Image (spheres, rainbow, N blue to C red):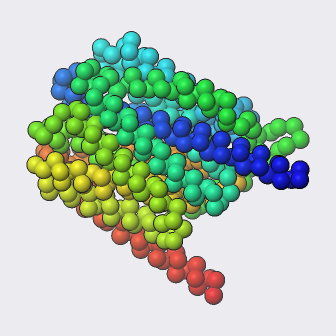
Amino acid sequence: MNDDLKGIANRKKQNVLMWTMLIIALVQMPALALTPAIHLIQTQAFPEKTLAQVQTVMGLSNLVWPLTSIVVAFLINRGKVTKKGAVVFGLVLLFVTGIFALLQHTFFWNLIALSVLLGISCGGFVTNAFGLLFDNFDDETRQKVAGYQTSSINLGGILFSLAGGVLATMIWYGGYLILLLGLPVAVLAFITVPYYKSPSAKISGDYTEKSKLNPRIFYYAAIAFLFMMIYAACGANISTHIDKLGNSATSGILVAVQMGGGVVSGLFFGRLSDKFGDMVMVFACTAVFIGYLFIGLFSSSLVMITIGIFLAGTSLSIMLPRCIYSVSTLVDKSNSATATVIISSIAPSLGGFLSPIVFTNLTVALAGESTVFRYLFLSGVVLVFGLTIALLTHRRTKKEKALAA
């Protein structure tokens, strides 16, 4: 009877934690509240700056994010802070970023400071929210929750992009004000997230030597990095791409549609991942390939662009959850903090940061400011990327079957 009661209590705790993680996931893509305003910021707020400069500064958070995550992971592994503390700190700083935008938004350095604050915030709470998934659920539940979590991230992205697009038509920094939601979520996390220290921390009577990282973690990290370089270009260029078809509010709607694609695919991720394994990553690349073709080839049709951006959006809730889930099967509690930083912070964040630096500047050099060429060029890049993943996955599967035989 006591065991049954303990089992029920544990399930209730897991359910509460799961719902907390899903609510935290709603605010895990704050940059999407800002994306619809990129064209407006470049042409009206800071017209002396180029599009690539504005994109790079607004993407600066993707550089600060992994650096912060590394520091936080180091402190977690040394027992100086807990994952709960890191999550709460990051969410509170998200709120502070919104306050800063309200008070300081006149100079270009303000935009830089906002990106730095946002990067520190995400480095605290986003990475360790995924770490809670690694530490508190078994393999079967983890795969299911990973899909739900990504759907929640995309749902939050929809809400952020819609609200950000509308607010940007009123004031260019309007999207930053949505970050004020960080405070109530921080309070929820403080109440419900369990307090525990990493087993690799030198705690009296509870010290376990840290396990070495499996080399395959870096394979999935490389995939996440390259994928986010390609995927981030979609939202970063859409406001400029549809300049003659709509305004910031229209851009916000399109980014919301992109996130809507992620919500839908995330609901089916668990079953797809279980059936197809790593080959689902090829499906994600195919979705981006077709989506970018639609966006580039039908640049004068808002309907076709909407279809294309929805298809591209479905890829996010397939690719990243698969990478994260695969890594979660390769770690234990002693090295999960480090692995989490690599797969959910360093790899995707650096990919997002380098995306405009590489692809915007490269396509400008090849074909000028044409966003049509940019989307078509990226469709070719993601096609090659998907074929490479398919080849590597096939070879590994064949090798594993041979070893099993």
Numbered disc total: 0
Q: Name the spot of residue 105 as percent of width and height, x first.
A: 33, 16
Side of 136 where 67 appears, left or right: left
In the picture as drawn, the residue positioned furthest to the front comes out as: 1
Would you place residue 399 above or below residue 121 in this image?
below
Residue 390: name its quadrant: bottom left
Is any atom of residue 393 visible in this view? yes
Q: Could you say where residue 116 lies in the image, as x and y percent from the top left?
A: 44, 27
Whether residue 57 appears in this view of the structure is no
* 20 horizontally vs 264: left or right: right
Q: Residue at the location (28% across, 31% down)?
A: 165
Q: Position of residue 403 (x, y in %)?
A: 62, 82
Between residues 98 and 303, which one lies in front from this camera angle?
A: 303
On screen, residue 300 versus residue 337, left or right, reads left
Q: Farthest residue toward the bottom?
A: 405
Q: Position of residue 326 (x, y in %)?
A: 57, 60
Residue at image coords 58%, 45%: 130
Does 334 sit above or below residue 168? below
Of 377 and 36, the residue lying toward us: 36
Q: Residue at x 82, y 37 (%)?
A: 203
Image quadrant in which the C terminus is located: bottom right
Q: Is residue 397 above or below residue 157?
A: below
Which residue is rendered at x = 75% and y = 38% of the image? 196
- As displayed, is residue 165 above or below residue 16? above
Front one among 218 and 188: 188
